[in-house]
Image: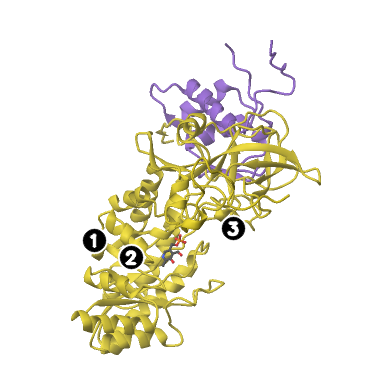
Chain colours: A purple, B yellow
Amino acid sequence: MKETPPDIQRLRVLALSETGFVFDPRTGHSYNVNAVGIMMLEGLKAGLSQEEICSNVRKSFKTGDAEIEEDLSAFLRILKEHGLTDTRGADSPKESVL
Amino acid sequence: MIRKPYERPAMVRNVVGRMNKAGLASGIARRESVEGLSIEKLCAEYGSPLFVFSERRIRSRVREAREAFGRRHPNVTLCCSYKTNYLGAICAIQHQEGSLAEVVSGMEYEKARRLGIPGNRIVFNGPMKTRDELVRAIREDAILHADSLDEIYSIERLAAEMNTKPVVGVRVGVDAGVHPRWDRFGFDLASGQAAQAVRRIAAGGRLTLGGLHCHIGTYILDPGAYSKAAKQIAEFAAEIEKMFGVSPTHLDLGGGFASNNTLGSQYYAGGIAPTIDNYAEAISTALMSAGNGRTRLLPLLIEPGRAIVDDAGTLITTVVSSKSLANGRKGVVVDAGVNLLFTAWWYRLGIETDRATDGLLEETAVYGPLCMNIDCIRESVPLPDLRPGDHLVVHPVGAYAFTQSMQFIRLRPAVVLVNESGVAECIRRAEVLDDLDGPERLPERFKPREEGNRSAPTSRPV
Ligand SMILES: Cc1ncc(COP(=O)(O)O)c(C=O)c1O
């Protein structure tokens, strides 16, 4: 099943530092994110596709046989759990209860 | 370009707590578990409210503190501040990690002894130590820090009676720029009272000088205050060596490091506490650059309380009802109030819920179950539309909340510890009425009459 692309509006307001400190001015929450996470966040903020983000990660990290695509999906779930993305995009249809 | 090793993307939220501000976003993270265990299941098994502690978090904080100081000082020992949380299991974890016990009463002292801590691993502080408590502490070689001249005189008398020469340290009051100053404890340094106390101990012939103790306050957000305190203590140690020819056995810089909580007066939630590294750096640097060669090598004790255990404690509470207040604002009543969260008067505790929401969050007042107007945990916190049976998760509540909890109107709930394998163990059962009634003695004439003769003891008002 193709995942709904995340709504990245909320990510745009995040302040990221190279050291991995992320601040969300909307909620006042701060986070620590590792280097791969920061690269993914930057890619998401810039509106890159998931393929482009994964390819950037491969260029910058010794990824070996890591499942970057799966990890990115997992990271998107983490962002969602933190309330930083929302897959219910404005124009995506509301899930039916029927 | 050197390619760094890949690690799976990770994101850890630093702080629990929410900004108190209008213009709320919809959708907050739903919280269905505490320390990896289902809230629903925990409540089903142990009841609600429920305190949940994490063994892993306590151990990792102790290790973090130990390593932060260990990297910078040759001889540091942590002490477990009993008053912060003297649940046996919580103290025992810290003792397993090598911490001494830091107690401020005979009751706490006995608790430490029952955990198998010998007297010589108990630091006995505080403004009140009874004669019996002192006798025991002397007999068991406890690490005593005297708080007043009267106490020193008492110890001298006991020394004579017991025909021994106890080792007695002094609590020193310094101006570290902290307001309000905790100047009611110990002996003021600047006015010469600390020197007087040391002279009495060193020259009085009945006692031997122990350590120099100092605890500048609590939730100290400025590590610089510790630099000031440590410098003065180190210089004082060097000075008494010159003046009286004695050297303290150790220096004890007390506790007071801030935890990752949010003060009531803070605008943004959390995130303002310095790291333990910051405090360790401030204290160690000051100790290593002040005093003399000998004072630099004196064993150092540290007594952090809230910085170690605050984050490890969570309170699960259940919504009883939800209502609109007179001004239209939302309010919920939950089954835990200031009887269990004394700290709510001081902290803006983080509150999350297990209710899923895609609607708007509303500013909601969270009230406890006491029939008292003061029973409010948070005046205003953005929450979804809560229903009876929903849970709120209050965090961090590991420090002082339990030890300061009141058996007022309601009995205290159970406490569980989630061990390192992720399994919950009950470390304190929920109280029953007998725990409260046990010490009471009801005069015979007030006792209800036997079955079969059940007229009320007093006549009923009409
Ligand atoms: C002598 C002494 N040591 C340690 C502590 C622990 O303080 P905190 O929890 O602020 O670290 C206290 C608390 O008041 C104290 O009085």
- Vertical arrangement, residue B287 with respect to residue A30, above or below: below
- Vertical arrangement, residue B199 with respect to residue B353, above or below: below
Q: Is mark 3 within 8 Å of ligand 1?
A: no
The residue tagged 1 is: B118
- Where disc 1 sits, the SS reads loop
- Where disc 3 sits, the SS reads loop
- Quadrant in the rendering for residue B70: bottom left
Residue B386: give x, y in percent of width and height. Answer: 67, 34
The residue tagged 3 is: B346
Residue B407: give x, y in percent of width and height. Answer: 51, 53
Q: Distance between the residues labelled 1 and 2?
A: 17 Å
- Quadrant in the rendering for residue B114: bottom left
The residue depicted at 23 percent of the width and 81 percent of the height is B159
B69 horizontally vs A89: left or right: left
The residue tagged 2 is: B301
Which-is-in-front pick, marks 1 and 3?
Answer: 1
Q: Residues within 10 Å of mark 1 (few under 14, many from 20)?
A: some
**Labels 3 and 2 share a subunit:** yes
Q: Quadrant of the N terminus of chain B?
A: top left
